[in-house]
Image (cartoon, rainbow, N blue to C red):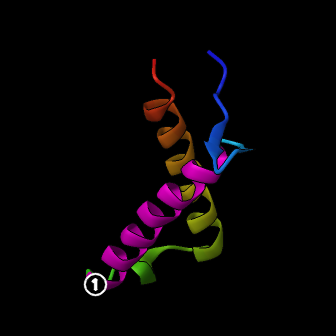
Amino acid sequence: MMLQAVVFSGMEFSPLVVYFPIAFLLAALTRFALHRLNWHDRIWKVAWFEVSLFVCYLALTVYLLDGR
C-alpha cells in the first residue's frame, strides 16, 4: 500500500512530515530513560545507537500508521 499525502491548508505534504516527529519523540523519550537509569554509559557508540534507534522507531511508526 502506498503512503498517502497529508493535506494541510490546500497543500500536500509527504506523510513523513507526520512520522518524523513521532519517531523523534519516541527516540528522545528512550534517550531520557537511558540517562535516568544510568545505562547510557554502557553504550559503545552513542551517536550510532541513537541514529539506529530513530530509524527503527521511524520504521515502526510507518508500519503502524500506514493503515494495514
Residue found at x 31% / y 75%? 33
Residue found at x 57% / y 65%? 49
Span of residues in magenta: 16-36
| Badge count | 1
The kind of residue on which mark 1 rests is Arg
Residue 27 placement, left or right of 48: left
Residue 8, above or below 5: below
Residue 51, above or below 63: below
Rendering coords of residue 24 (x, y %) = 52, 64
Q: Residues within 10 Å of mark 1 (few under 14, many from 20)?
A: few
Residue 55 placement, left or right of 43: right
Quarter of the image containing the N terminus?
top right
In the image, 34 versus 68, the foreground residue is 68
Rendering coords of residue 32 (x, y %) = 36, 79
Residue 4 belongs to magenta span = no
Read off the residue under disc 1: 36
Rendering coords of residue 34 (x, y %) = 35, 75
Residue found at x 63% / y 63%? 51
